[in-house]
Amino acid sequence: LRFTEAIPGLPVAEISTSLATASVALHGAHVLSWQPAGQAPVIWVSKAAIFELGKPVRGGVPLCWPWFGPLADKPMHGFVRTMVWQVRGAELDASGQLVLRLGISDDASTRALWDFAFDLELVVTVGSTLTIALTTRNTGATPLSINQALHTYFATSDIHQTTVQGLAGGSYINKVQNFAVCQQEGDVVFTGETDRIYTDTTADSVIVDGVTGRRIRITKQGSASTVVWNPWSEKEKNIVDMAAGEHRQMLCVETCNAGPDTISIPAGGVHTLAATISVE
Ligand code: TA6
């Protein structure tokens, strides 16, 4: 583990073990890459991504918290993806995985946007699997109500030949159809802009890359909703930090507490949202 600062003010933890390489920016506690030994990169970052203090990064694993999506005149997807997090610890566990702990808690800037006391800790466990666990602790005297997402961008060879298994039979809120509630029949396939909150699902999702045959499994905890997103060719043009045609090589499958899956945390209580990503 070493910290680099290619861009002043934006330190990145670079992790390299016999099991995998990974990088995590302290800005946003943002996982930027993970590559298990012998595998192609699993996480996608745009070639046009902007690395600047206060700006979210297009790709990797942005943390959406304490709300998901837009909220009045406040920052989209909450405010912690653009805060600078503190390193709370880094150690190798018994199986040779590097465990990195980052944290933040409320301060004047967070209170101005959301007037609650909290402590947030992100534990990233880098090995032949990748586990990302975000723990919210209510350090105040009143209950907290949150929505959140591990807004994970995955790399794929060709979105037209990519499917997502594990969501069949479930219902979803279709953001590209005026929030209509729809039913998922069979695997998810991509034929246009896709922006869906699958509600009431705790199941694993498996991304199948039809070109390479690679399967990426996402196992989750503390989550009853999954978001699937691809902006497709038209929306992509309006996203300044995405290059032309890049929607073909990415998709987001997000471990969430989104939509009706809202989490209430009593004073002194704790909730952990976690995803384990493995390659099959
Ligand atoms: O998770 C899907 C989504 O909420 C989409 O609606 C889309 O806007 C995306 O997130 C990206 O949001 P961002 O603020 O990172 O541009």
Image (cartoon, rainbow, N blue to C red):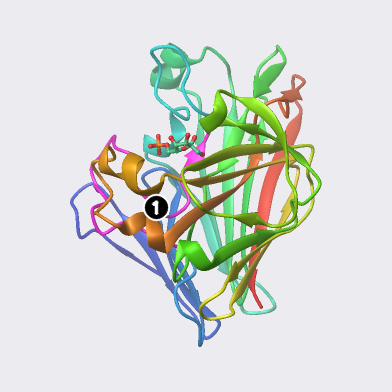
Amino acid under disc 1:
Gly
State the residue position of label 1: 59
Decide which of 199, 93 is in the foreground and name it.
199
Disc 1 element: loop
Residue 22: x, y in percent?
45, 69
- Magenta residue check for 200: no
Residue 234: x, y in percent?
33, 42
Task: Please determine whether, in this image, residue 123 is positioned above or below residue 227.
Answer: below
Q: Residue at x 65, y 17 (%)?
A: 140
Q: Is residue 91 left or right of residue 43?
A: right
**Ligand 1 - quadrant of the structure image:** top left
Q: Residue at x 76, y 42 (%)?
A: 222
Q: Residue at x 57, y 16 (%)?
A: 116
Q: Quadrant of residue 182?
A: top right
Q: Residue at x 53, y 54 (%)?
A: 190
Decide which of 73, 126 is in the foreground and name it.
73
User: Would you say residue 149 is visible in this rendering?
Assistant: yes
User: Would you say residue 83 is visible in this rendering?
Assistant: no
Residue 238: x, y in percent?
27, 37
Task: Please determine whether, in this image, residue 182 is positioned above or below residue 95.
Answer: above
Residue 194: x, y in percent?
52, 43
Q: Which residues are magenta?
A: 43-66
CB at disc 1 and ligand 1 closer than 8 Å: no
